[in-house]
Every structure is written in C-alpha cells, then in structure tokens.
Amino acid sequence: MTGPELAEAGRLLAAARRPVVFTGAGMSAESGVPTFRDAQTGLWQRYDPQELATPAAFRVDPALVWGWYEARRHGVRRARPNPGHLAVAAIQARLPETVVITQNVDDLHERGGVPAPVRLHGSLFAPRCSACARPAPLPSDLPPPADPPVPHVGPVPHGEPVPHVTEPHDGPLTPPACAGCGAPVRPGVVWFGEALPSAALDAAVEAASGCDLLLTVGTSALVHPAAEIPLVAARLGAPVVQVNPVPTPLDAICAVNLRGPAGEVLPALVRAAWPDAPAG
Ligand code: BJW
Ligand code: ZN
C-alpha cells in the first residue's frame, strides 16, 4: 500500500454515497479464522477444503464433514472482530446506504457492528435438515472442558428432542438428527454445485448494479457466481478498490489496488476518507 494509492482510494470513498463492501475470507484472517484456501490445521490438514465443501462429501461421510464445520464454528466463536470489521462498520455508519456483501460464513461482521450483511454462502450458525430443510437448533456450546466431555444422550421428559451437546473438538462427529424427519442435520452453508440463496444473490446484484464504489476485501475471486459481483459494478462504471496482500484476478478491473492486510488497510482507508472521524 502506498500513500498516493491510499489517498486516491480515500477520495473515492469520501465521494461515494452508495458503496458496496464485498468481503471474503481474508477479512477475518486477522481474527484468527483461517482463509478457505489456507493450509488447514490439525487433523484437517489431511483434507482439501474444496472436497469437504460438497454435498457428495456429506453424503459419503456426514460425520467427517459435520465435524469439520463444528470445529470451524467453535473456532469462530472464540474469534473476535478485527479492526477491519470495525472499519467496515464505520463506513456504514458514515454512509447508511452502504451494502455489505459477504461470502464468509462466520458472524464477525455482525459482531463488528454491521447488523445485516448480505450472506452469499450461508452461515455456520444456521444448520438445517439435509432432507426436509427444517431449521435445526445449534448444538449447545459448553465452556471448554477441564475433563473429557460427557455427551448428552439421555432421554428428556415429554419426549422432546434432546439438544445435541458438543464440546470444542477436533475430529469426525455424528450430526444430530432432524426433529421432523430424522435425517442428518447439515451446516447451513452453500456447497460447490449448490445454488446461492436467490434473495441474497438478487440483493447483491442489485446493490452492485446501483453502487458508486465497490470495495472488495480479502477474496481470491475464484468462486462463482460471487466473484462476478465486483465485475457487475465495474461494468456499470463504478470504481472498484481492492484490499488484498496479493494480486487476484480482479486486479485488472480495479481503479486502485491496496496491497496489505484488511485489519491495517481498512482503518487507514477510513482515516484517509474522513480525517476527522475515528476509524474504529
Ligand atoms: C487477506 C488477508 C488479510 C489473506 N487481509 N486479505 C464459473 C466458472 C468456473 C466455475 C464455476 C462458475 N460458476 C459456477 C462454478 C462452479 C463453482 C465454482 O466457482 N468453482 C470454482 C472453484 C472454479 N461454484 C459453485 O459451485 C457455486 N454454485 C453454483 O454455481 O451453482 C449453480 C447452480 C445453479 C442452480 C441450481 C444449482 C446449482 C457455489 C459456490 C459455493 C462456495 N462455497 C464455499 C464454501 C462455503 C462453506 C465453507 O466455508 O465451508 O464458500 S467455497 C469457499 O470459497 C467459501 C468462500 O466463501 C468462497 C470464496 O473464498 P474466498 O473468500 O475468496 O477465500 P480464499 O481463501 O479463496 O481467499 C482468501 C483471500 O484473502 C486471498 O486472496 C488472500 O490473499 C486474502 N487474504 N489474508 C486481506 N489479512
Ligand atoms: Zn428433516
């Protein structure tokens, strides 16, 4: 990131009225949440995320896939929004028509002060039945155990469904059964080969079509149709500013490329746009 580029991006942001902030996994990297294409940690090093994030993987080995998502959900629970998330909230506070579109399945935008991001790829916190799509309760979370956890498997009075209790863990885990039809519960995320939620995709395309600046942050721009959102804005004449430590396929369409981590660049961008305002 250089001074002239930051100053130019700051001018574009200060002049915007309806910006879109489009985020990917790099947005949460400084919160300690691994990016999607980062090397996996622990047991999961043996698996390619692109092969786990598919309906076929869940059909073949539901415990492997559910365990991976539960481990990630527990990791996100322990993570905190970073200064980049707070800077995005500061942009929205300054420009209320700002639309935040995220590919991330964590909840760090919400916890960082953006109440309703457009979620293109679902959420780690909205499991549903893999057969009938009935929303399922989140497994209850206990504080980290001092001793090995005791799973809650006993019956409850009145025949009510037993909340599935898990501890932070690292390994395959049988998913709970749907209270309606008994089929395995799945994570509420969008896997490869699945359609994106149409309301979210429509909202994202509409916002990108009408924006006067698109700020793309921390995405490799390899996964479609999400990767087309910045292209829609550029095609209709909006300047695109990118925040990423490394080049991406979006470089060529960007008015400004800010090379650096979101947690540093975004607060600096807010300060450049509005020198009088706190960056969060
Ligand atoms: C930092 C940083 C720091 C690091 N600061 N930055 C057109 C062309 C080719 C293929 C297709 C196409 N259209 C569709 C496809 C197929 C497929 C696809 O795109 N495949 C490609 C991989 C080739 N797409 C689909 O299958 C989609 N569905 C679909 O098209 O359905 C059609 C259909 C229609 C009607 C009926 C039925 C079907 C669905 C895609 C779903 C993607 N889901 C995932 C998993 C979600 C759950 C989970 O998390 O497990 O979403 S995949 C994964 O990639 C995840 C992410 O949201 C998504 C994007 O990744 P992201 O965010 O860009 O992360 P990374 O890791 O790739 O990059 C991180 C970046 O951060 C890097 O650039 C770093 O440098 C940077 N960074 N530190 C700033 N501190
Ligand atoms: Zn069901």
Image: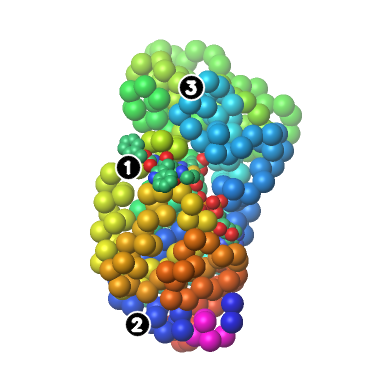
Disc marking residue 163: none
Q: Hey, what amino acid is under mark 1?
A: Pro
Q: Which residues are magenta?
A: 3-7
Per the image, the residue denoted by label 2 is 15
Where's residue 269, x and y in %? 50, 77
* Residue at the image point whose x is 52% and y is 27% from the top: 57
Task: Kindly tell me whether residue 9 is visible in this rendering.
Answer: yes
* Membership of 102 in magenta stretch: no
Where's residue 30, x and y in %? 61, 59
Q: Hey, what amino acid is under mark 3?
A: Arg
Q: Hey, what amino acid is under mark 2?
A: Ala
Most prominent secondary structure in the magenta stretch?
helix
Q: Nearer the viewer, residue 36 or 106?
A: 36
Disc marking residue 59: 3
Tell me, what colour scheme is on the image?
A: rainbow
* Inter-mark Cα distance, 3 to 1: 21 Å
Mark 3 or 2 closer to N-term?
2
Q: Quadrant of residue 121?
A: top left
